Image (spheres, grey):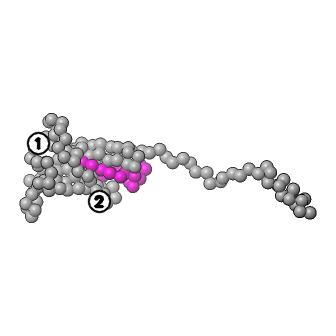
Amino acid sequence: MNRILLAAFAALFAGCIVYDSDVRDPPPPNQPPYIAWAEAGCYWDGYGGDYVWYFEADVDDPNGAGDVIAVYADVYDDWSGEWIDGFELYWYDGITWFSDWWESSTWLDCYYAYNVVEFTAYDYFEAVDVVDVYPYVYE
């Protein structure tokens, strides 16, 4: 009896094909982040007795704002093309990244007419977006 049951059981599963009903589509291709808005500038802080440089950018990504991993602001001399100083921005809220610095801790001068700030945003797959802005000096 055991041989017959074993033979029937083996015949039952001999031609079995298993299909995975939970087949997933491949992940969507990576899209680069985009800088929707950026601003840089400096202002006098009477309490601190120094100028303050600030850098702010709204950075989003078609793959989700969480795909953005780093935002930097590099300041260049627009007249000579030389790099002056660079700053990392920190996630602040939603899609906003921000950083501010005392002028005395940088190589910057609020009243130098040829400063240009290059914002660069990176995502997890190293796709980038770059935007240049001229800083505003508040008086």
Seen at 34% across and 47% down, the residue is 122
Q: Is residue 120 visible?
A: yes
Q: Which mark is residue 113?
A: 1
Can you give x and y, in whole percent of width and height, for residue 41 in the image?
A: 17, 51
* Image point (84%, 53%), residue name: 11
Which image quadrant is residue 126 in? Answer: top left
Q: Is residue 131 above or below residue 1?
A: above
| Residue at image location 27% in from the left, 49% down from the top | 72
Q: Are marks 1 and 2 in contact (CB under 8 Å)?
A: no
Secondary structure of residue under mark 1: loop
Note whether residue 39 is visible. Answer: no
Q: Residue furthest top?
A: 80
Q: Position of residue 94 (x, y in %)?
A: 34, 58
Total residue callouts: 2
**Kind of residue at disc 1:** Ala
Where does the magenta region start and end? 58-73
**Nearer-the-camera pick, 100 or 34:** 100
Residue type of the residue flagged with mark 2 = Tyr
Q: Which residue is mark 2?
A: 92
